[in-house]
């Protein structure tokens, strides 16, 4: 698994814009500290992780996900593909639930 990407959170960004219109400048500046990453104190609060590989049965899998350290928003995307057969096979999994299967 790799975690070499960090991004801003679209949900936190929308909330900051909303607060900007209702708080005084001083209140807003104090509140913005709550939107920084708790450990790194940056605005990039979404950790992006990904993993891919082929298991012992020849199933190729790819996973890409992210999690916001401030608001808890969570993204999860998985694809699994078995070796081609005469008909081919593709399986899409979303949040650990089996998705569509095309034969």
Image (spheres, helix red, strand yellow):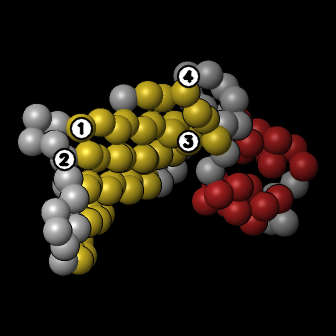
Residue 39 tag number: 4
On the image, which quarter does residue 86 sit in?
bottom left
Q: Which structural element holds mark 1?
A: strand
Instruction: Say left or right for 39 vs 60.
Output: right
The mark nearer the N terminus, 2 or 1, is 1
Residue 37, position in %: x, y? 60, 32
Q: Quick check: 48 above or below 24?
A: above
In 3D space, how far apart are the residues under numbered discs 2 and 3 (Cα atoms)? Answer: 29 Å
| Residue on which the image places disc 1 | 54
Q: Residues within 10 Å of mark 1 (few under 14, many from 20)?
A: some
Which comes sooner in the sequence, label 1 or label 4?
Answer: 4
- Label disc, if present, on residue 46 of the rendered structure: 3
Q: Residue at x 9, y 42 (%)?
A: 57
Labels 1, 3: front one:
1
User: Which of the marked residues, 1 or 3, is nearer the chain's N terminus?
Assistant: 3
In which quadrant will I find the N terminus? Answer: top left
| Residue found at the far front of this picture | 86
Tag shown at residue 9: none
* Mark pair 1, 4: CA separation: 34 Å
Q: Are marks 2 and 1 in contact (CB under 8 Å)?
A: yes
Q: State left or right for residue 24 relative to residue 93.
A: right
Which residue is at 44% across, 28% downward? 2
Q: Earlier in the sequence, mark 2 or mark 3?
A: 3
Which of the labelled discs sits on residue 59, or is there none?
A: 2
Closer to us: 84 or 16: 84
Q: Residues within 10 Å of mark 4 (few under 14, many from 20)?
A: few
Considering only vertical position in the picture, is 95 above or below 42? below
């Amino acid at each position: 698994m790799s975690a070499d990407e960090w991004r801003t959170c679209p949900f936190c960004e929308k909330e900051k814009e909303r607060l900007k219109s209702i708080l005084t400048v001083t209140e807003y500046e104090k509140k913005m500290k709550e939107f920084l990453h708790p450990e790194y104190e940056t605005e990039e609060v979404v950790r992006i992780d990904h993993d891919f590989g082929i298991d012992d049965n020849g199933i190729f899998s790819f996973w890409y996900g992210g999690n916001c350290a401030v608001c808890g928003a969570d993204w999860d995307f998985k694809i699994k593909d078995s070796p081609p057969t005469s008909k081919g096979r593709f399986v899409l999994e979303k949040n650990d639930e089996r998705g569509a299967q095309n034969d």
